[in-house]
Amino acid sequence: MKATTTILAVAILAISPTYAQNNTVDSYIQKGLKENLALKQQNFDLQKASYALKEARGLFYPTLSFKSDYFYSSGGRTVDLPLGDLMNPVYSTLNQLTGTNNFQNIANQKFNLNANDFYDHRLSVTLPLVNAEIYISNKIRKEAINQKQAEVMVYKRSLVKDIKTAYYNSIMATNQIEIFKNAAKLLQENYKLTESRVKNGKALKGNALRILSDINDNQAKLTEAENNLKTANAYLNFLTNTALTDKVAIDTTGFRFSKTQMKTPSFETSGREEITVLKSAITQAEYNISLEKASYFPTINTSLNLGYQNNYLKLDPDDRYLTGIVSLKWDLFTGFQTRNRVKIAKTEATSLNTQLDETEKQFQLQLTTATNELDTAEAQFKSAKENLQSLEEYYRETKARYDQGLVLLVELNDAFTQLINGQLAFEQSNTNVLIKLAEVERTAASYQF
């Protein structure tokens, strides 16, 4: 009767409607939010968006650069300058008048238009004065950060639900293992009693063989439950970025569902981070329309150059120069490219607005579906709880009558099978209702970080 008392005590404990906050699952949630690899990748994307904003802001500042050019050329166009034809007659007249030969004849000159053996070293400062594209691009990058922040929150909520589900499955597998272990003790007790009756000629040997078959079947189910526990633990460790074989701390506090856990979630579709992501995408699309329209307006830039120009390896203070330039660019006709790009941007914005309307309705449908599934799971849990109470009493009575030789083994086996199945059904329904509760929490975005 000791094994009978043990298994019935497990059944009574299973249907106790207690609830308390489970600090262990909360610790796994916090660990997952800190160590999950996929979440880290989301945070890296957020960092990249932040750096992209800083990059866009850098376009407002002047650009300082050093530039150096060296020119070498041979051949090409030339210019003939007839200096000899112009000056030699004058020089001859002067020599005659002065009676000297001080004025020598010179030859005609030919100059190459391409610079040869010439350098240009300079510091160049450029600054955009009027450029709407830079201003709008900065606003787009800033809005992209808001979108990435919302995407990180979306993943966090899904991660919380996945961790809770994995942890509940680990506890369920642990309890199933305990059920099969206690069942094994009870089967061994029944086998010893039946063996004794066989020896005394009060039972057939087939009865003992039937119990041995049940023992083997129970052992197979125990192995399956142990493997299910390993799988559930491995998945939980994966979510928290822990070695897959690490032991999971099992804490059944708060694992038993009760109505005290039920909280009607306040649901505002505007508060869902997925809605924030879409609204941010719409804002960026509207900015992109303005960005494309900016091509209709001119851009004005200024630059300042300070440098040296001379022949190679020659450096003289007189070779310094300073130039300032203000340039304007205005595309008057681009083959209707700008107009079509604006239309594309407007179409994208319209598409995103339609997607937003659809998403809001989808979330309302998801909440309705999740709530209905939770109600169904709760009803199944209540049924399994009441069934287990009845099956526990039925097995107790059948076991007592079997010990007195008043019922056949087939009746005991039937009561035993129904009790084990009832316990397993209770564990499954209990886990299912908690998982459904986590899904409602996820759908309503009600978890508080």
Image: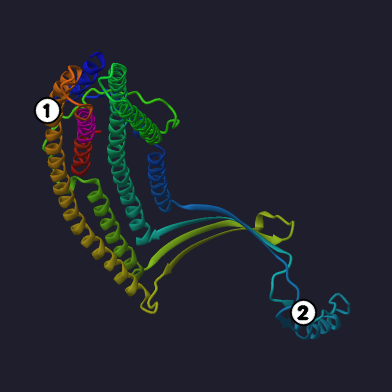
Q: Residue 109 got which mark?
A: 2
User: Seen from this angle, which residue lies furthest front?
Assistant: 201
Of labels 1 and 2, earlier in sequence is 2
Q: Residue at x 13, y 31 (%)?
A: 387
Residue 38 locus on image (x, y percent)? 40, 41
Q: Amino acid at mark 2?
A: Gln
Please state if 95 lies on the left or on the right of 110 as rendered: right
Res 47 quadrant in image: top left
Secondary structure found at label 2? strand
Residue 99 locus on image (x, y percent)? 88, 79
Please state if 122 lies on the left or on the right of 293 as rendered: right
Residue 115 locus on image (x, y percent)? 69, 70
Residue 128 locus on image (x, y percent)? 42, 58
Q: Residue at x 70, y 80 (%)?
A: 77
Distance in Å between CA atoms under marks 1 and 2: 122 Å
What's drawn in magenta, residue-wise? 413-430
Q: Residue at x 72, y 80 (%)?
A: 78
In the picture of the structure, the residue carrying the numbered disc 1 is 390
Nearest the viewer among 349 and 264 is: 264
Secondary structure found at label 1? helix
Q: Residue at x 40, y 33 (%)?
A: 234
Nearest the viewer among 360 and 349 is: 360
- Quarter of the image with the C terminus is top left
Residue 425 colored in magenta in the image: yes
